[in-house]
Image: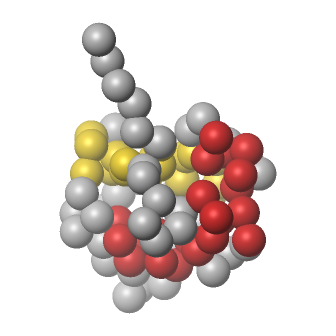
């Protein structure tokens, strides 16, 4: 699955995107966040517990309990505002 990072998150992680193969027990966006945090200090910082960021699964905004079954892409992005 492709993981994409936006804005300051990609600078903190060190890459704008990466291909990953999470283990079978990674079933939700929240599980994926936990698993990704262990990849590097940058991942841990960008995806820190309590940090404000959102997620999208296959280009649709998703909550952290959203399932990953057959997902091709997960994106993480900081909050944004409109006006």
What is the basis of the colouring in this image? secondary structure
Left or right relative to 30: residue 63: left
Q: Residue at x 64, y 40 (%)?
A: 8
Determine which quarter of the picture holds residue 44.
bottom right
Q: Nearer the viewer, residue 27 or 30?
A: 30
Q: Residue at x 77, y 51 (%)?
A: 14
Left or right relative to 7: residue 62: left
Do we see residue 23 in this rendering? Answer: yes
Do we see residue 69 in this rendering? Answer: no
Question: Percent x, y for residue 16?
Answer: 67, 42
Q: Is residue 62 above or below residue 7?
A: below
Left or right relative to 37: residue 63: left
Instruction: Looking at this view, name the residue that lies furthest to the top.
Output: 83
Question: Percent x, y for residue 54?
Answer: 37, 49
Left or right relative to 67: residue 43: right
Instruction: Looking at this view, name the residue that lies furthest to the bottom.
Output: 25
Question: Percent x, y for residue 19?
Answer: 62, 58
Q: Residue at x 42, y 52 (%)?
A: 52
Q: Please state the total of marks drawn on the protein image.
A: 0
Position of the C terminus, as image quadrant, is: top left
């Amino acid at each position: 699955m492709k993981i994409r990072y936006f804005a300051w998150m990609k600078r903190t992680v060190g890459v704008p995107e990466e291909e990953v193969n999470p283990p079978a027990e990674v079933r939700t966006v929240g599980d994926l966040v936990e698993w990704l945090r262990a990849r590097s200090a940058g991942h841990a910082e960008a995806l820190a517990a309590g940090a404000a960021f959102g997620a999208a699964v296959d280009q649709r905004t998703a909550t952290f309990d959203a399932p990953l079954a057959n997902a091709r892409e997960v994106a993480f992005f900081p909050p944004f505002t409109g006006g």
